[in-house]
Image (cartoon, helix red, strand yellow):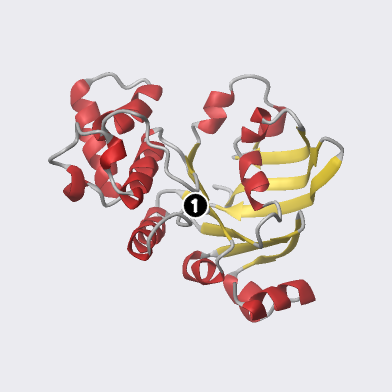
Amino acid sequence: MTDPSIIKIKNLKVYSDKALILKNINVEIPRNKITVILGPSGCGKTTLLKSLNRLTDLYPHLRLEGNVFIDGEDILQVNGDLTRIRQKMGLLSQRPFPLPMSIYKNIAFGLKIQGIRDKQIIEQKVEQYLWEVGLWEEVKDRLHAPAARLSIGQQQRLCLARGLAVGPEIILADEPTSALDPVSSRKIEEKFLEMKKDYTVIVVTHILRQAKRLADHVIFMYFGEVIEQGAPSEVFDAPQTETLKEYLQVGH
């Protein structure tokens, strides 16, 4: 039987030099659901997200303790072969970073990382992933134009398509709509809601309204700690701590 939790984090601590910035994190993230990591700016949400694909390794001043199990494998104990771990996850940043090449080549790049070389398969997959993010009809006549000519909202969806082309199980999204207009933001949210049947989606946000629209599971963080976690009906409608009650009252 498949474990309903795709990620299990146990006693995770993250130090920046000697300062403790994530404090004893214990969470489970359900498979094929949208988990929202919610909290004010600077509370450790992005650091937690980066811990999930070892992007923390890029910051020499960060040190991790504890366990992060993905599909039963403790990724903090893996030496080398981080590419395999990172291929399990598509990453969507706050601002889109399309590669300095055509729309088509941006997605073909992700496919080639998987070892796909057949041009016909690449063409089919490029179309498939552009459809998945709702971009095909908008760009099908200019696939070989520079990706940089797309609007910011289109670039973000292109980056999502490129992330899907790597063949991930999990989509990590760090404030994915913070640089977007309302229409583009809605399109990204709609795609996440559609995609959870095939992927596990983890969204970092400080926007309470967005969390309420998207979340199947909520993790509320404050000053490097997980304060509450659970179903939206529990977290939003029956908060247990004064910290969360105050956060919900302010409305963010």
Q: Residue at x 75, y 52 (%)?
A: 26
Q: Quadrant of residue 53?
A: top right
Q: Residue at x 28, y 28 (%)?
A: 105
Viewer-nearest residue: 93 or 23: 93
Where residue 58 appears, as percent x and y from the top left, is 64, 29
Residue type, mark 1 in image:
Val
Q: Quadrant of residue 144?
A: top left
Where residue 21 appears, as percent x and y from the top left, is 78, 47
Vertical placement of residue 230 versus 123, above or below:
below
Q: Residue at x 33, y 64 (%)?
A: 183
Which residue carries the number 1 mark? 201
Where residue 10 appears, as percent x and y from the top left, is 76, 46
Q: Is residue 9 left or right of residue 124?
A: right
Q: Residue at x 69, y 40 (%)?
A: 68
Q: Is residue 217 left or right of residue 66?
A: left
User: Is residue 234 shown to the viewer in this render?
Assistant: no
User: Is residue 160 shown to the viewer in this render?
Assistant: yes
Considering every residue shown, the one lying at the far front of the view is 149
Q: Quadrant of residue 122?
A: top left
Vertical placement of residue 178 versus 129, above or below:
below
Mark 1 falls on what kind of element? strand
